[in-house]
Structures are given as structure tokens and as C-alpha cells.
Image (tube, rainbow, N blue to C red):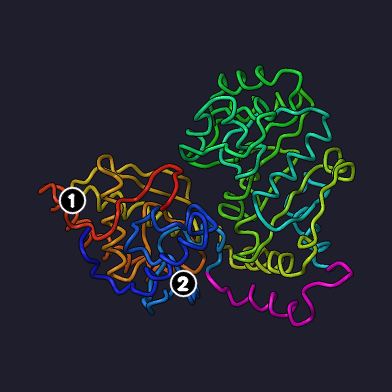
């Protein structure tokens, strides 16, 4: 590995310290430096406003990567959300009594999703999904869950890899280890593939009479077919089990609320997080009364679910998202980025594949992806951009920013194309190639 030409001394020093103090270095897999280009990726920030991020070495970047891992849909430190949060902090963020904002948030989410009757709140996506699955199991008196997509780190989900090694490989990333998950959960989580009706029927048959719920993301890489939607609805009704929409990633992107509203799904429950709080901790489970009322027959409770900041942030985010018609802007910006990727790659003869759903998109190189994407990230850092294989649009992304990104992207791809022809990309990589699946970081 060559000596880096980037000014990132403080960041690299803190990474070394973190490696000794924090198993895995960070709290989120997607924020580990080895997911981008370890040795050059800054990893830590001290300021973030709009789409601008300042790292520990005072480098300023425009963020054209995955925007707070999809949590900051309006942009970093949005002034309207921040004001709402600061106001309730000054009034008191917690007390023996409950914050009224949780009632207002329940009203707002049910207003946006007329099919729903009730809501419960927590603070992170993974725990909200666990709450939804717990409620479904209580409501049905059954144990097995059939699912597709990524749904977090909890035992109920990772149990899929107890029954069949690598069962989750095609759902999100490969190599998710179920170590620590009770072996008794084997066979309780059964995956199926999106838009694959026969595979879905096979999963339902495997669950048999012990089916507790159908869990899925409404969209990830492509839209559902009507036949698939109909099959999901028919089965949920036939088996008398709740259909749970995991909207943690998709919600508040393509419309004002869950993506299922626009795609045609009719769920019994839906789970929200990420964009809901625009960077503040907020998550929600909403649903029809027939299933949600069973939450009272299960022990589901936590002190920090009653703090005030999460609900206040969510209310402010929703109000602004609707007021500025953020969904239209997100789709417009991501469409421009998609075209920049494809047109520039074609211009320089680099073969890439673009996927995802607008406004959450990603690209990959057809050959030597890990090295090529890390070189791309490295060179974009030098031009003042946080950039990788993914792009999550934020309301704060402006067209003038996209023009700057397009110019930098063109220059980097021009050099990358030349290095590919010479077979010398790896020789010019100053960090380490991006990691793929789940693995230890040492």
C-alpha cells in the first residue's frame, strides 16, 4: 500500500484507537472504513450541515454517498428539524410523564396511512422490526416468519442462517454469522425471493400451519409485479396472518409516507425508522387494530422509547417533507446521478451495472469491482466528495452540487479508464480494496 496523499492523519489515528476499544471499530457495519477504502476513508466527522461534511482533519466534503445511511433524508442538521428538537430539549426531553408528541405522531402517521389504526414507537429500526414480529406472533399464536429483504440484526431474522448456511446471502450481504442466536430458533425464519411467486409459495409451504407473519420490504432494487403483489395479499388473507411492510429504508423517498402507498401493497403493519427522524433516533410500528391490540398481551416496553426528541424530530421531518414536496426533488436528483453514471461510463468504455430504486441507487463495476470502486472513492475524496458505489438523495442536494459532482466524476473515470487499460489500478490505490460480505475487521 502506497503512502496516502490525503490529509487524514487525525482520522487514521482515531481509527487505530477505536480498533482497540470498540469491537468492529464502529457501531454500524456500513460505516466501517473497510466498506469504502480503509487507509484513506476519513471515517469520523466533526461537523455536518446540508450535504457538507467536515472530518477531523478539517477536510470539507460534499456527500454524494449514502447520506447518513439513508437517515438524513432532508440533509444534515436540517434547521427546521433541529429547531423542533432544540425546543423540546429546552422544555425537557424526559420526565416521569409522557411527551404529548407521541400522540401527535401517531395521529400523523395514521393520517398518512388511512389503512392503519394504531401505532407504537421505539428508537431504532432493528428493534422496531423485532416489536412488529413479536406482536404478530402473539396475535397469531404461531412461530414461523417468511420474509424477503434485509430486516436487521435481531435473533428472529438471523435465525434464517441456522437452518441453512448462507440463507441470507441473497437478501442483503453474504456471510452474516448467526453466532449467539439460540439454536432453538432454527427453522423459524424462512426467506423467499422478491417477485418470485413460486419461491414464495415454497416458503409458505415450509412454514406450514405454524406461519405467524409475512415480512418484506416494499421495494429495494426493482418494482413488484402485480402478480406478486396479488399472491402476497391472497396468502396473507388465506392464512389469516399479518403482512408486515419493512419501510425502514424505503419510506419517505418516493411519496409522503411508506413506499407501499404508491406501489399497491395493502399491509396489516408497517415499520418506519431512518428517514423518520432525519438523523435523530425515531422508529414506529403502525398497524390495523386487529393485530396491533395484541401489543398489550406481550411485554414490549423501554424507558428511552418515551423520550421526547425522537417524536418531535419525526413530526418536524414529516411536516417539512410534505411542505417542500421532497419526494419529487429526491427522484429528480437521483435521476440525474443515474444518467451521470451511465453516460460517463459509456463515454470511457467502462462497463458498470446500475441498480436500486430511485432515489436510493448504486452501481458496480462488471470487473475488479473492489479495487476499482476503492480507487474511485480515493480520487473523489481528493476532489472534495464523499463518494462510493451508492447514492442516497437528500433534499439538501442542489442542482449546482450535482454539476460539480458530474465534473469530478468525469475526471476520475477518465483516469480510471486509462489505468484499467494499463492494468495498473491496484498500483495506484493508496488504501485497501473495499470489503464485500460480513467479516471481522482487525
Establish if 172 lies above or below 347: above
Residue 310, numbered circle: none
Is 317 positioned to the left or the right of 432 in the image?
right
Mark 2: few, some, or many residues within 10 Å (few <14, many ≥20)?
Answer: some
Which is closer to the viewer, label 2 or label 1? Answer: 2
Measured as percent of width and height from the top left, residue 264 is found at 64, 38
In this view of the protein, which residue sits in the foreground, 11 or 295?
Answer: 11
Residue at image x 22%, y 66%? 3
Q: What residue is shown at x 20% (from left), y 61% (from top)? A: 2
- Label 1, secondary structure: give it: helix
Residue 85 in magenta stretch: yes
**Where 266 sits versus 186, above or below?**
below
Point out residue 291 in the picture as x, y percentages from the top left corner: 83, 38
Range of the magenta residues? 76-99
Residue 99, quarter of picture: bottom right
Q: Position of residue 17 (x, y in %)?
A: 45, 67
Mark 1 sits on what residue? 348
Locate the N terminus by quadrant: bottom left
- What residue is drawn where x is 60% and y is 57%? 274
Q: Nearer the viewer, residue 187 or 398?
A: 187
Instruction: Give the side of residue 38 with respect to residue 412, left or right.
Output: right
Name the residue: 51% across, 63% down.
Answer: 21
Read off the residue under disc 2: 45
Q: Is residue 386 above or below residue 268?
A: below
| Res 318 quadrant in image | bottom right
| SS class, disc 2 | strand
Amino acid at each position: 500500500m502506497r503512502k496516502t496523499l490525503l490529509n487524514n492523519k487525525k482520522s487514521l489515528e482515531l481509527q487505530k484507537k477505536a480498533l482497540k476499544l470498540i469491537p468492529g471499530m464502529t457501531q454500524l457495519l456500513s460505516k466501517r472504513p473497510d466498506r469504502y477504502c480503509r487507509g484513506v476513508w476519513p471515517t469520523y466527522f466533526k461537523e455536518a450541515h446540508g450535504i457538507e461534511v467536515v472530518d477531523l482533519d478539517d477536510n470539507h466534503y460534499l456527500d454524494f454517498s449514502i447520506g447518513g445511511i439513508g437517515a438524513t433524508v432532508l440533509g444534515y442538521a436540517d434547521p427546521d428539524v433541529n429547531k423542533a428538537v432544540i425546543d423540546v430539549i429546552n422544555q425537557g426531553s424526559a420526565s416521569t410523564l409522557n411527551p404529548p408528541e407521541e400522540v401527535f405522531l401517531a395521529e400523523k402517521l395514521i393520517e398518512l396511512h388511512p389503512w392503519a389504526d394504531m401505532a407504537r414507537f421505539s428508537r431504532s429500526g432493528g428493534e422496531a422490526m423485532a416489536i412488529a414480529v413479536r406482536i404478530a406472533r402473539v396475535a397469531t399464536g404461531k412461530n414461523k416468519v417468511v420474509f424477503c429483504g434485509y430486516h436487521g440484526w435481531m435473533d428472529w431474522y438471523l435465525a434464517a442462517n441456522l437452518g441453512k448456511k448462507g440463507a441470507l446471502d441473497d437478501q442483503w450481504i453474504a456471510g452474516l454469522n448467526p453466532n449467539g442466536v439460540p439454536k432453538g430458533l432454527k427453522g423459524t425464519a424462512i426467506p423467499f425471493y422478491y417477485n418470485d411467486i413460486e419461491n414464495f409459495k415454497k416458503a409458505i409451504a415450509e412454514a406450514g400451519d405454524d406461519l405467524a407473519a409475512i415480512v418484506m420490504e416494499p421495494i429495494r432494487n426493482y418494482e413488484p409485479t402485480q402478480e406478486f403483489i396479488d399472491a402476497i395479499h391472497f396468502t396473507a388473507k388465506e392464512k389469516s396472518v399479518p403482512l408486515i411492510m419493512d419501510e425502514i429504508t424505503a419510506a419517505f423517498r418516493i411519496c409522503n409516507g411508506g413506499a407501499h402507498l404508491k406501489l399497491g401493497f395493502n399491509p396489516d403493519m408497517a415499520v418506519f425508522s431512518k428517514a423518520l427522524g432525519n438523523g435523530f433516533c425515531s422508529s414506529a410500528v403502525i398497524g390495523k387494530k386487529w393485530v396491533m391490540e395484541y401489543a398489550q398481551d406481550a411485554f414490549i416496553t423501554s424507558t428511552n422509547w418515551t423520550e421526547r426528541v425522537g417524536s418531535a424530530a419525526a413530526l418536524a421531518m414529516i411536516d417539512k417533507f410534505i411542505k417542500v414536496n421532497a419526494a419529487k426533488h429526491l427522484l429528480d436528483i437521483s435521476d440525474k446521478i443515474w444518467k451521470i453514471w451511465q453516460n460517463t461510463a459509456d463515454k470511457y468504455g467502462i462497463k458498470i451495472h446500475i441498480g436500486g430504486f430511485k432515489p436510493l441507487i448504486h452501481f458496480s463495476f462488471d470487473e475488479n469491482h473492489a479495487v476499482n470502486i476503492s480507487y474511485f472513492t480515493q480520487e473523489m475524496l481528493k476532489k472534495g466528495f464523499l463518494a462510493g458505489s451508492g447514492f442516497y438523495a437528500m433534499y439538501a442536494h442542489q442542482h449546482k452540487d450535482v454539476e460539480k459532482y458530474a465534473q469530478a466524476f468525469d475526471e476520475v473515470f477518465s483516469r480510471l479508464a486509462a489505468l484499467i487499460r494499463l492494468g495498473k489500478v491496484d498500483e495506484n490505490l493508496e488504501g485497501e480494496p473495499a470489503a464485500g460480505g460480513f467479516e471481522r475487521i482487525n
